[in-house]
Each structure stands twice: as structure tokens, then as C-alpha cells.
Amino acid sequence: MAVTDYHHGVRVVEINEGTNTLRTVSTAIVGLVATASDADATVFPLNKPVLFTSISKAQAAAGTLGTLSMALSCIADNARPVIVIVRVADGEGATDEERAADQTSKVVGDYVGGQRTGIQALLTAEQQLGVKPRILGAPGLDTKPVAEALTSVAEKLRAMAYVYGHGAEDVSEVLGYQQGFSKRETMVLWPNFTRWSTVENKAVEVPVVAYALGMRAYIDQTQGWHKSISNVAVNGPTGIAKDVFFDLQNPASDATLLNEGNVTTLIRKQGYRIWGSRTCSSDENFSFETAARTAHVLADTMAEGHFEFIDKPMTPSLTKDILEGINTRLRQLKALQYILDGKAWINEEVNTTESLKSGKLIIDYDYTPLPPLEDLTLRQRITDQYWADWALRVSTGS
């Protein structure tokens, strides 16, 4: 009942104002595209995103053929994330080349007759399932066109696409392959891991991307999205599929060359580790995976957190509440060491009378992401100055 309506009596009007609490969006949500011709079709319908909060339940229905079973096993070695799975059909054709091309087309997907297929189906996950995949990959299927499609969808979802250096046999080839990408949402990894197969009774090559999906989710769950995927021990691998020379103190190593060329590689030091923090971004502001993910998380946190404000009367107090809510969240992220700092403010120059009376409000905010410590220099000096107090050292025994 509006206050202007006639009433003979007492009114109680609840006034719900004040700063809005902004919840940080969930990031440890994997979006996986895979093949599995013998999977349970009722659990994994073709080209439909399916939500699993238990990876064990997904494994139970995944079958053994195709890429799905192995990908789930590698992810499960390190994490138990929420996962959205899109199963695509196997490629068809008279020759290996035709089957490979058809497989790529099915994974890339399309939008036909109001239905999205393949990777494109990940775009419907939020509306159909209530979650937005943030960690995308198609392990074992990520040819260059697939990697491009993953990147395109990742941009729309504010997610990261983890892709393999497809076809590269050595360091120079994968560095050349990486040159075909320029987006902050893409991370190229090379080479693959190996792991023991209880079916073949030997070590087999497995997609590094599958492990990257699990590790990214694990790090998000245990440390946060501000920690890069690099230098965390990986469970499961028994080896590295290609020779990569690594020396922590030698800048002339293969690993350093790969990282410098925006390729994330693998090392064995106190266990097997993914080594590298750089994206394929042509913008230096987003060279690091952590900078890209910070931008994604903040953008969605700020936007989604203000959904309830849309279409409310644009009063000065409402504007103040929005401003205070953003600044409060930025201070919290600073205190938790997710960002270095940030602030929000009203710019009077852009909030003109014309724009305000049209229902348009512009609030600016900035932030500084925290880069990973990538290059540590320790300057060692030899000196004779400690001989100067020799007598005192003798008398004190120190």
C-alpha cells in the first residue's frame, strides 16, 4: 500500500536500506567437453550440459571409451570440484583425416535450430543448471580450432581456457603454436604428463589439460583464485611425455624459454608440477593468469551483486549504498590479500544531469591485482667486515 493512499489508522512500513553485501562469485567450477561413446546416455545426453557435484557419480556413468573417463580420473586425482560436462559424439568419416576433422567440428559446436552443441553448450549452463563454468577445457580434443572456440566461450563466461600445444613435438614448435593466440583467457600448456595405466599395465601419455583443470579447481578451493596454477605438486603423474630441461637457477633452460614465450610447462622438483603463470594476452596488464582471473572475478562480483538494485528508485541514498558496498568488498579483498588495493568513486563529469534523469548511473572503481613472484634475485656478497670485531667474538664465543 502506497503511503499516498488514504488510510485512517496506523501504518508500518519496513525500510530495508543499507550497504549491500557483495558475495564473491564461485570460481572452482570446471567446464569439460569430452567424448564417451559407451557412457550412460541418460546421464550424459549428447550436447547437453550436465551438472555434477560429485565427480565419483560422473565417473560411474562415464564408461571407458573416449576422453571422458581419463579426464575425470586426472581431475579426481587432485580435486573434487563442481563440474559441468558436455558429451559430444565421436567423429565420423571414411579416413582418419575425415574422422579427425569431424571430431573437431563436433567439439567446436554450433548454434542451430535454437540449440547449442559442443563447446557452445557451456554457454547455457548458467540458465539451465544455475552455475557458470570458470575453468574450461577439452582434454585430448583441443586442436587449434577447438582451442579458439574454448577461448571465445571463455571470454563470454569470464572464464579461463586451458589448451594443449597441439601437434608440437619440441620447444620451438610449441612456441610457434602459442603465437596463434592473443587473449588473456587462454593458457597454453606443453608437454603432456604420463601416468600408469592399469588396463595396459604401462605408463601412458595423458592430457596435461585434464590435470590443469583439476589443479586450477584445487588451488581455487584451498588457496584462492589469486594464486596461479604454477608450482603446486600434482597428484597422479609418473612422468613427463617430452624432455624439458629445467634448472631453477639457470635462465637458459627450456622451462624458462617456454615461460618467456607464454607457454606453461611441466617440471619434476619435489614432485611433478605445472610450471608457468602466463596467459597468451597481448595486453601486458593481463600477462599473468592471476591478473586475468582477478579481472573476471571482480567484474562478475560487482555486476551480479547489484542485480537487486536494478529498477529501484535512483535516490542519493541508493547510490551511496552501492558505492559503500563496492568499497567494503574491495577492502575485504585487500585484507585477505587477494588484491593489493582498490577503491570506488563517483565521477561527477560523466554523471551528467541528462544521463542521471535517463536512469543511467556510472560508478568507477579500480584495483591492483597481485602478481606471482616469478623472478627472485638474491644478491650474494663476500666480505671481510666480520673480522673487524674478532677479539669480541673470541671473548663471547659468538
Image (spheres, rainbow, N blue to C red):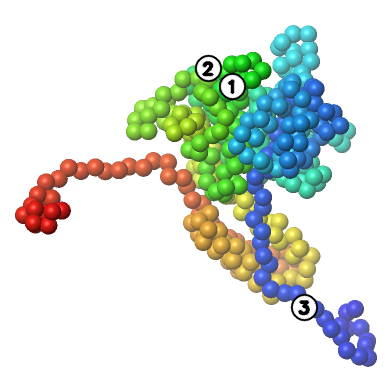
Whichever of callouts 3 and 2 sits on the residue coming sooner in the sequence is: 3
Q: Residue at x 86, y 83 (%)?
A: 3
Q: Nearer the viewer, residue 62 or 114?
A: 62
Q: Nearer the viewer, mark 2 or mark 1?
A: 1
Q: Residue at x 6, y 54 (%)?
A: 391
Q: Amino acid at mark 1?
A: Trp
Judging by the rendered image, the residue that carries numbered circle 2 is: 169
Query: Residue 85: x percent and y percent?
Result: 75, 35
Q: Is residue 192 above or below residue 354?
A: above
Q: Residue at x 70, y 24 (%)?
A: 67
Identify the disc placed on residue 15: 3
Q: Is residue 393 left or right of residue 238?
A: left
Judging by the rendered image, the residue that carries numbered circle 1 is: 196
Q: Nearer the viewer, residue 303 or 197?
A: 197
Query: Residue 236: x percent and y percent?
Result: 57, 30
Query: Residue 278: x percent and y percent?
Result: 51, 37
Crowding around mark 3 (Cα neighbors within 10 Å: few <14, some 14 to 19, many 20+) is few
Q: Is residue 14 left or right of residue 204?
A: right
Q: Is residue 138 left or right of residue 386?
A: right
Identify the disc placed on residue 92: none
Looking at this view, name the residue that lies furthest to the top.
95
